[in-house]
Image (cartoon, helix red, strand yellow):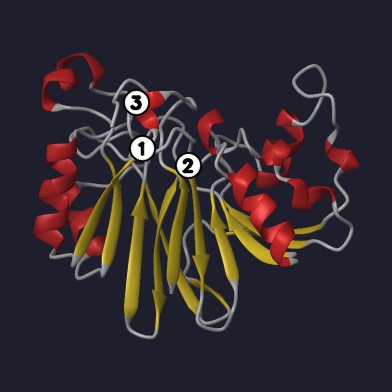
């Protein structure tokens, strides 16, 4: 399992000299499996560069999984060039976020006056699959969802292939339980023994009195989870737009 990060910034894309090392694109993760499958997690602004890479490689058959429907996680999709190619085949997975299906979520952002290109102008062959509660497979990859603690709800995921595991928990507030969210112990059990954990770490402890209930964790809580779950490697994710390198 190869994991590549195309965007790890939260809320809004940023640029400038202070963001050269960790980047300014919003969330997008690429997974390449042992059997050659490509799985994309979220469609933040980072998906634009990934799309260019896929076109250059002529890789036009892949899966896409959404964690939730907030703007920073879907804003790059209209600029993802493979969706305008007739040869492209995409299996899209996600939950009905805030009473919207994934198809409705996409069509809403690709409609006037929000965007000049309509959803009906997409040429790719897209199939939609709900992925709310049950474990499912994508080729050699086993995917298990878990509800995240975040306004308007969403899902985190555990990816497993041949004994290796990657847990992705962005936009997850560990010290406040939003409707539909889980307790700290549940996320600990979910991430237990993972080879790699990416977890939301938007805020510093001194930020939290003001930002509590906003749907993001302080980095110390994310670290506490990683230690309690006994993960092998840990990555801070969803960096605040005001945090420089």
The answer to whether the residues at label 2 and label 1 have Cβ atoms under 8 Å apart is yes
Occupied quadrant, residue 122: top right
Which residue matches tag 2?
A: 27
Residue 45 seen anywhere in this rendered image of the structure: yes
Residue 244 place in picture, x, y as percent: 30, 26
Is 54 left or right of 28, judged from the image as shown?
Answer: right
Which residue is at 19% across, 57% downward? Answer: 188
Mark 2: give few (<14), some (14-19) or many (20+) Cα within 10 Å. Answer: many
> Earlier along the polypeptide chain: callout 3 or callout 1?
3
Identify the secondary structure beneath mark 3: helix
Q: Residues within 10 Å of mark 3 (few under 14, many from 20)?
A: some
Q: Which mark is residue 238?
A: 1
| Residue 128 visible in this rendered orientation of the protein | no
Residue 164 screen position, x and y as percent: 33, 78
Mark 3 lies on residue: 18
Q: Nearer the viewer, residue 208 or 86?
A: 86
């Amino acid at each position: 399992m190869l994991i590549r990060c195309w965007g790890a910034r939260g809320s809004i894309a940023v640029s400038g000299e202070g963001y050269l090392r960790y980047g300014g694109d919003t969330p997008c993760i690429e997974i390449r499996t042992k059997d050659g499958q490509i799985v994309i997690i979220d469609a933040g602004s980072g998906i634009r560069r990934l799309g260019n890479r896929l076109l250059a490689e002529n890789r036009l058959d892949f899966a896409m999984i959404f964690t939730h429907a907030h703007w920073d996680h879907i804003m790059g999709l209209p600029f993802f060039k493979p969706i305008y190619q007739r040869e492209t085949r995409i299996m899209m997975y996600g939950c009905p976020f805030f009473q919207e299906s994934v198809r409705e979520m996409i069509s809403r952002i690709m409609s006037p006056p929000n965007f000049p290109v309509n959803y009906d102008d997409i040429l790719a062959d897209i199939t939609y699959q709900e992925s709310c509660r049950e474990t499912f497979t994508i080729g050699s990859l086993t995917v298990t969802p878990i509800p995240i603690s975040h306004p308007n709800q969403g899902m985190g995921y555990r990816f497993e292939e041949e004994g290796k595991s990657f847990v992705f928990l962005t936009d997850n507030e560990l010290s406040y339980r939003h409707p539909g969210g889980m307790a700290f112990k549940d996320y600990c059990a979910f991430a237990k023994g993972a080879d790699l954990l990416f977890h939301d770490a938007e805020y510093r402890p001194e930020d939290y009195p003001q930002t509590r209930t906003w749907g993001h964790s302080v980095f110390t809580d994310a670290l506490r989870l990683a230690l309690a779950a006994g993960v092998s490697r840990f990555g801070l994710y969803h960096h605040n737009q005001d945090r420089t390198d």
